[in-house]
Image (cartoon, helix red, strand yellow):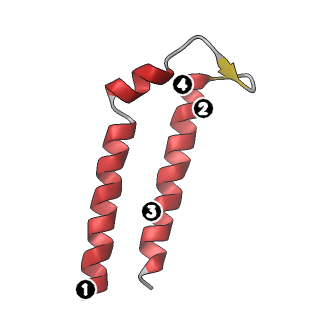
Amino acid sequence: MEQVDLRGQRLVALCMLGCVLFNYPILAIFNVPAAVLGIPVLYAYIFAAWALLIALMALAVEQGS
């Protein structure tokens, strides 16, 4: 029972982290006219942050079982 509660708290924290990562002040930092490996910096940031959140969610869900 305690593991399920801890897992839920971790997922809620990751949701809040996602809201912060994809909100205006952070996105404005990466909205520059430059490219990383031919990909605009903003798109590269969005993809990297999305992948990071998915990896952290997988760790949070699998760690309890």
x and y percent of residue 22 in the render?
38, 35
Give the quadrant of the N terminus. bottom left
Q: Quadrant of residue 25?
A: top left
Q: Residue 7: x percent and y percent?
A: 33, 73
Residue under the image location 67 percent in, 19 percent down: 35
Q: Which residue is mark 1?
A: 2
The first of marks 1 and 2 along the sequence is: 1
Q: Which mark is residue 50?
A: none
Alpha carbon distance from label 3 to label 4 = 22 Å
> Which image quadrant: the C terminus?
bottom left
Residue 29 falls left or right of residue 36: left
Q: Amino acid at mark 4?
A: Leu
- Counting residues from the start of the chain, the first of labels 3 and 4 encountered is 4
Question: Which label's residue is closer to the chain start, 4 or 1?
Answer: 1
What residue occupies the far right of the structure in this picture? 37
Q: Find numbered disc 4 in the image and state the secondary structure of the residue it sits on.
A: helix
The residue type indicated by label 2 comes to Ala
Compared to residue 10, the image places residue 29 above or below, namely: above
The mark closer to the camera, 1 or 3, is 1
Query: Which residue type carries mark 3?
Result: Met
Left or right of 20, for residue 44: right
* Disc 4 target residue: 42
- Provide the residue designation for mark 3: 57
Q: Residue 13's spot in the image, x, y percent?
A: 30, 57
Q: Residue at x 52, y 51 (%)?
A: 52
Q: Contact, CB < 8 Å: mark 2 with mark 4? A: yes
Residue of label 2: 44
Ranked by sequence position, the earlier of labels 1 and 3 is 1
Mark-to-mark CA distance, 2 and 4: 5 Å
